[in-house]
Image: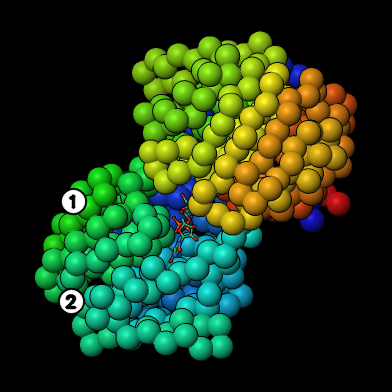
Amino acid sequence: MEKYVINGGNKLYGSVDIQTAKNSVLPILAATVLTDEKIRILNVPEISDVNNMVKILIRLGCKAVFSGRDLIIDSSSADCFEIPSELAHELRSSVFLLGSVVSRFRMAKIAYPGGCDIGLRPVDLHLAGLKRLGVQITEKNGYILCKCDKLTGNEIMLDCPSVGATENIMLAAVRAEGCTTIKNAAREPEIEDLQRFLNAIGAKVSGAGSGTIKIEGVKKLGGCEYLPIHDRIEAGTFLVAGAMCGGEVEINCSCAENLSSLLHKLRENGCNIYIKNDKIVLGSNRRLTSVKSIETQPYPGFPTDLQAQITALCCICSGQSIITENLFETRFKYASELRKMGADITVINRSAFVRGIDRFKGATVVAHDLRGGAALVLAGLAAEGRSEILYISHIDRGYGAFEYKLRKLGADIVRVAV
Ligand code: EPZ
């Protein structure tokens, strides 16, 4: 096990490069099972969710080789349609493989997925969508068993704009017979990225980013080289770090458009933000004013994956805020850890009620999940004194070279074996 040791109080100055998006790369990796041609995914982030997804692909019989940060996948020798629990439980995105594995083998057997413990995280919408395409599904002993004679295009209406369900259905539909329409589809930028990737290997997908996605089934898919979009959540995390610590940070990413809900809130807090070409520059004098309320929503609303980070910021703004988490049932586990650092935060049902304090006090705290863990790091950077963040393997799932990038901005943070 490893921990971060942080001496807080340094302002942050400088420029940081942003990784390619975890939540694009993971469904794209699932999509590589759909073709026998080689795929080269460029500049893949150095995170454990990617490494675990690669382990699953290798278990399916795919070849996966890193060349620097590029990842070359060859699924021509894939010969297994079963993902065991010890791999599936590692990450949520193992569930995306249902769609691509059943498309390739007409069979799939996958243990229930893992991922951050932030709520119930059902898969009913994934399964309902696959059934609409002709998949027979049984759930037994913690496994989801899928089989079909063939996949046939259909119209699918999602009860809620689930990112994963949208992606899973896209993957199952690209080689189905006939056309599929997904209504009330998720509109996240990562869905558009998946569409671009699928079309780059010969699929016929349109409408991603709107609420309706159309897929015209094709018989065969090819290969390609593909550079995924920047990780807007990593970029947002560094922007909030700059706001909390004070100073001036320059975020090298072309994702300002995808972060407009966060940028709007940070400007309300009193941050100076300007965008030039592929950079977002944020200046902060550290004592910021609270925003009255923040509600997480499906894209383009405020992203749930930045909820913990903006709440940590609200804790050290003057005034009061109410942050409401509308997507996941238990995504405030980090609040009790922030209280150990002096935060005045009370969670009632899906809302956190925050009264701003002057500064966090350093403390030893525990990361319970990926984004909550990142929020604790930001609190430690802004705190007075020394903090230790335990169980940072949660953070390693989604942030590559996190402490290195923060040190480059002037933070005093080191990774220590426990
Ligand atoms: C994806 O998770 C992301 N993960 C999450 O990022 C992100 O928080 C989430 O989308 C929302 O944006 C990946 O892309 C790998 P959902 P996913 O299905 O697909 C309900 C991170 O920190 N729902 O959009 O699991 C569900 O309960 C991670 O990077 C059903 O009811 O999210 C939730 O309330 C955390 N039935 C809502 O939809 C289903 O079958 C949104 O979930 C599926 C979902």
The answer to the question of whether label 2 and label 1 lie on touching residues, with beta carbons closer than 8 A, is no
**Rendered location of residue 212, percent (x, y):** 22, 52
Q: Residue at x 88, y 26 (%)?
A: 385
The residue at which mark 1 appears reads as 206
**Rendered location of residue 142, percent (x, y):** 56, 83
Amino acid bearing label 2: Thr
**Left of 20 or right of it: where is 149?**
left
Find out if the beta carbon at label 2 lies less than 8 Å from the nearest ligand 1 atom: no
Q: Residue at x 38, y 74 (%)?
A: 127
Q: Is residue 241 above or below residue 169?
A: above
Q: Residue at x 73, y 28 (%)?
A: 355
The residue at which mark 2 appears reads as 152
Amino acid bearing label 1: Ser
**Rendered location of residue 318, percent (x, y):** 70, 19
Q: Residue 364 — which label?
A: none
How crowded pointer 1 is (Cα within 10 Å; few <14, some 14-19, many 20+) is rated as: some
Q: Is residue 341 above or below residue 96?
A: above
Among the 4 quarters of the image, the one containing residue 274: top left
How crowded pointer 2 is (Cα within 10 Å; few <14, some 14-19, many 20+) is rated as: many
